[in-house]
Image (cartoon, rainbow, N blue to C red):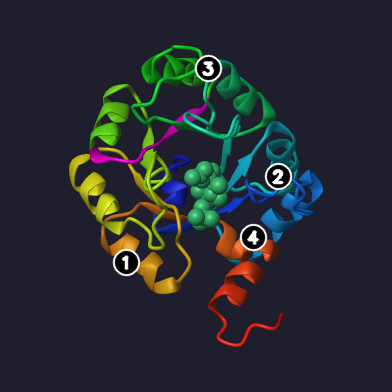
């Protein structure tokens, strides 16, 4: 069974500290590795992790397929923005490199296709994080092994509350590679909706892994939140 076959109809958990919270106490490779081990016990079939230290720690803790990335910067092309970042992700132990495959310029000026070749030459697969159908089609033409809706809602304008299940459906309808649903999945019915739309796997992040995010969300939604 191939690595991507192992993820078919499965849940992947993105084990990352909150990006907008530099002092998140969960920002620790040992902590992220323990979260990864716990979610695998709970039934997750894959992990997504950010940064070489977290990727290496998670790799040592679990045997499930590992999607790795390096976030660098705060605006524009941030997720594994260059071929050099992609090489570091593979060397840290990831099976699959997630990288920004939007139409935005890459800081090393290398094309997505070039970067994908670098990853393949090092023996890993590529997950193209996109925000539109056109970007997904371009990423597959450039050699991506799978496509994820990760960046839908994050390329400008207000960030929506709901996941983009419509994009999952359109990508799954058009692309010959696995489509991963990712971004703002919080509830079981949204996960079911993504699978019904044709998702190969669904990635859930903060709703599982971040006490900080979960607490904030509960307080924001509570009618009588204590002050
Ligand atoms: C947009 C972006 O940079 N997304 C990142 C991708 O690696 C992560 O911050 C998210 O945790 C991940 O996509 C899961 O997301 P959610 O917490 O929405 O389930």
Disc 4 to disc 2, how far (Cα)? 14 Å
- Are the two marked residues, 4 and 2, in contact with CB atoms closer than 8 angstroms? no
Identify the mark nearer the N-term, 1 or 4: 1
Label 4, secondary structure: give it. helix
Q: Residues within 10 Å of mark 3 (few under 14, many from 20)?
A: many
Disc 1 to disc 2, how far (Cα)? 29 Å
Q: Position of residue 156 (x, y in %)?
A: 38, 41
- Look at the numbered disc 4 and say if its residue's Cβ is closer than 8 Å to ligand 1: yes
- Are the two marked residues, 1 and 4, in contact with CB atoms closer than 8 angstroms? no
Q: Nearer the viewer, mark 4 or mark 2?
A: 4
Left-right relation of 212 to 180: right
Residue at the front extreme, as displayed: 227
Left-right relation of 175 to 57: left
Q: Nearer the viewer, mark 1 or mark 2?
A: 1
Residue 125 within the magenta-colored segment of the rendering: yes
| Residue that label 4 marks | 209
- Are the two marked residues, 3 and 1, in contact with CB atoms closer than 8 angstroms? no
Q: Position of residue 197 (x, y in %)?
A: 26, 59
Q: Nearer the viewer, residue 109 or 165?
A: 109
Q: Residues within 10 Å of mark 2 (few under 14, many from 20)?
A: many
């Amino acid at each position: 069974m191939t690595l991507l076959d192992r993820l078919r109809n499965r849940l992947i958990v993105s084990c990352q500290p909150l990006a907008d919270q530099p002092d998140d106490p969960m920002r620790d490779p040992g902590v992220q590795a323990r979260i990864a081990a716990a979610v695998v016990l709970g039934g997750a079939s894959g992990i997504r992790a950010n940064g070489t230290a977290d990727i290496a720690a998670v790799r040592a803790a679990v045997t499930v397929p590992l999607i790795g990335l390096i976030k660098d910067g705060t605006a524009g092309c941030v997720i594994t923005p260059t071929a050099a970042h992609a090489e570091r992700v593979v060397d840290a132990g990831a099976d699959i490199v997630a990288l920004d495959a939007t139409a935005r310029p890459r800081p090393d000026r290398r094309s997505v296709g070039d970067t994908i070749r670098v990853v393949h030459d090092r023996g890993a697969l590529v997950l193209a994080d996109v925000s539109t159908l056109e970007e997904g089609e371009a990423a597959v033409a450039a050699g991506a092994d799978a496509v994820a809706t990760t960046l839908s809602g994050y390329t400008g304008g207000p960030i929506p509350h709901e996941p983009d299940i419509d994009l999952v459906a359109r990508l799954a309808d058009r692309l010959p590679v696995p489509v991963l649903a990712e971004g703002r999945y919080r509830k079981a019915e949204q996960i079911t909706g993504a699978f019904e739309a044709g998702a190969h796997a669904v990635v859930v992040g903060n709703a599982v892994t971040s006490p900080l995010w979960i607490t904030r969300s509960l307080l924001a939604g509570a009618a009588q939140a204590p002050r």
